[in-house]
Image: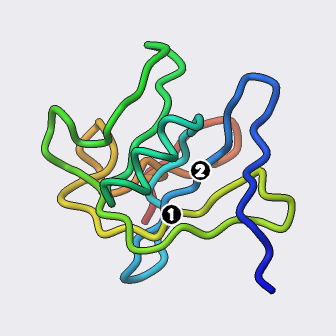
Amino acid sequence: MPEPFTPKFDAAGLLTAVVIDAEDGTVLMVAHMDAEALAATRTTGFAHFHSRSRGKLWKKGESSGHVLAVEEIRVDCDQDALVLRCRPAGPTCHTGARSCFYRRVADAALAPLA
């Protein structure tokens, strides 16, 4: 019998969600989901998150059009973190970069990825 999906939200009611490109596995972004965001994501097929700065539900791409179509949601062994395999409709980062992880730490500075 399959184990039930019972996500373990932290004290703030959040889960960490890592978003990867379903095509090539590139890490696109990391965000947080509360129960409302997780439910909206599962219902619509598009990634929703909890905006900690605004304190509300946020559909990725709601203003830019760069939505994330969710192909699969994976959960870790403790059910307290998720990986969303997505197909992005444009750049994921608000800077216009494909991924929010477009820099690396080089000594005490940030450097663009080669």
Towards the viewer: 100 or 113 = 100
Q: How far apart are marks 1 and 2 (CA)?
A: 7 Å
Q: What element carries label 2?
A: strand
- Seen at 49% across and 58% down, the residue is 19
Quadrant holding the C terminus: bottom left
Left or right: 63 in relation to 46: left
10 Å neighbourhood of mark 2: few (<14), some, or many (≥20)?
many
Point out which mark residue 17 bears. 2
Disc 1 to disc 2: CB gap under 8 Å: yes
Q: Quadrant of residue 3?
A: bottom right
- Report the disc number at residue 84: 1
Instruction: Report which quarter residue 82 is drawn in.
Output: bottom right
Q: Most extreme residue toward the bottom, as rendered?
A: 1
Residue drawn at the location 37% of the way across and 65% of the way down: 70
Decide if residue 95 is on the left or right side of residue 11: left
Q: Which residue is drawn at 31% across and 50% down?
A: 92
